[in-house]
Amino acid sequence: MEDDKYAKELDVAVRVVHMACALCQRVQEGLVSASTDQVKSKDDDSPVTIADWSVQATVSWILSEFFGSQNVSIIAEEDVQALSKADSVGLLQAVVNTVNECLAGAPKYGLKGPSETLSTSQILEAISQCNSVGGPKGRHWVLDPVDGTLGFVRGDQYAVALALIEDGRVVIGVLGCPNYPMKKELLNYHYQYHEAISKSSPPSPDIWERGCVMYARKDSGQAWMQPHIHGDKKFEWPNSAKLIRVSSIDDPALATSCEPVERANSNHSFTEGLAHSVGLRKKPMRVYSMVKYAAIARGDAELFMKFARTGYKEKIWDHAAGVVIVEEAGGVVTDAGGRPLDFSKGQYLEGLDRGIIVCSGATLHEKIVDAVYASWDSSSL
């Protein structure tokens, strides 16, 4: 890697996200192919799986091992409450097995795994260590182990998101998208369809290439994409990395917008009205998770707008990694008032002006912000 301030951090982050993606793929295949009790509900009724806890434990252990636990502060989505309950013994054992299997494969990714199998208490400790509350000072890793768990459970899109915040600024972002195809033309096909076709009549090796990891360092002016590591192949930097850039489309009539699949936390009606008023004509791309940021960074779409329902607070782990990747790929990310997102206030994006706007460029972004101001007073958000 090039010699820069965050070279080690970015190198380790990319490798551990590749590891986490492989872990998630193994778990997802089990969930999709069998009906299991590997899914729990959190207090807000959103699902959490053994992959969420296993990724969190794995990333926490690797970062602590590489940088020293005393130097690592991690803000992450999951806690160990549900996992520690008496009725979760089987679930906990599945997490322990999954984490140890993943860490045993660390050398494949150029990382050092544990010298012996981790105990249940060590794995619970690794998950529990992700208890930082963040803030304006110091370094904080931000992890969403499985962003878009509902998509994950349904065998669809999801992401593993890891970012590093220093003194309130996101300085590194890594986004693993295990089911996002390397080729844009395959976006309209469900990955299980790819696999079914591949098995019945094997095509050329890379035609159904699925899964990628995108990453960027703040102020580098570059964002990169690597293919997922398949089979017995070993990770070797730079792993066929390609530069990615946002789309050059700035005409709303030609732009493709991304929308959340789930309506629970988003005001789809306001977004749809805004899309109409600004002149968006193309059918929106409905995508689970931070894969929306990946789509814009790579030029597969031009716009993502999210206006939360009253009372919902945006969490930093749902945006941090995606924001820096889109910005370094040439895009613009602000709140609806045109201000940069503030990651210095802890676990939530405090002070957010109405919503979030992610655009492929400044011209389109300006049109959207103007339309928000024109439409806001007449809405019932």
Image: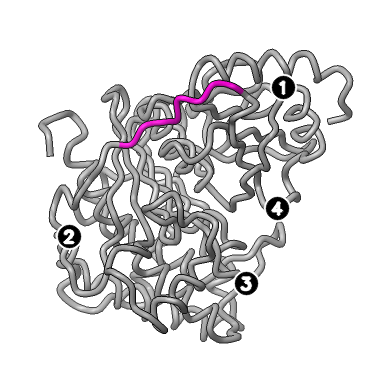
Q: Which numbered tag is attached to residue 262?
A: 4
Q: Residue 73 location in percent, x, y?
A: 36, 44
Name the residue located 54 percent from the left edge and 72 percent from the top edge.
Answer: 83
- State how far apart marks 4 and 1 are (Cα): 23 Å
Name the residue located 55 percent from the left edge and 64 percent from the top edge.
Answer: 156
Does the residue at mark 2 contact the one at mark 3 (Cβ under 8 Å)?
A: no
Q: Which residue is mark 1?
A: 278
Q: Residue 25 location in percent, x, y?
A: 41, 70
Under mark 1, the amino acid is Val
Under mark 4, the amino acid is Glu
> Is 203 drawn above or below residue 15 in the view shown?
below
**In the structure shown, which secondary structural element does the residue marked by tag 2 occupy?**
loop
* Mark 3 closeness class: few <14, some 14–19, many ≥20 residues within 10 Å: some
> Is 151 drawn above or below residue 297 in the view shown?
below
Q: Closer to the N terminus: mark 2 or mark 3? A: 3
Under mark 3, the amino acid is Lys
Q: Which numbered tag is attached to residue 362?
A: none
Confirm whether the magenta stretch covers residue 247: yes
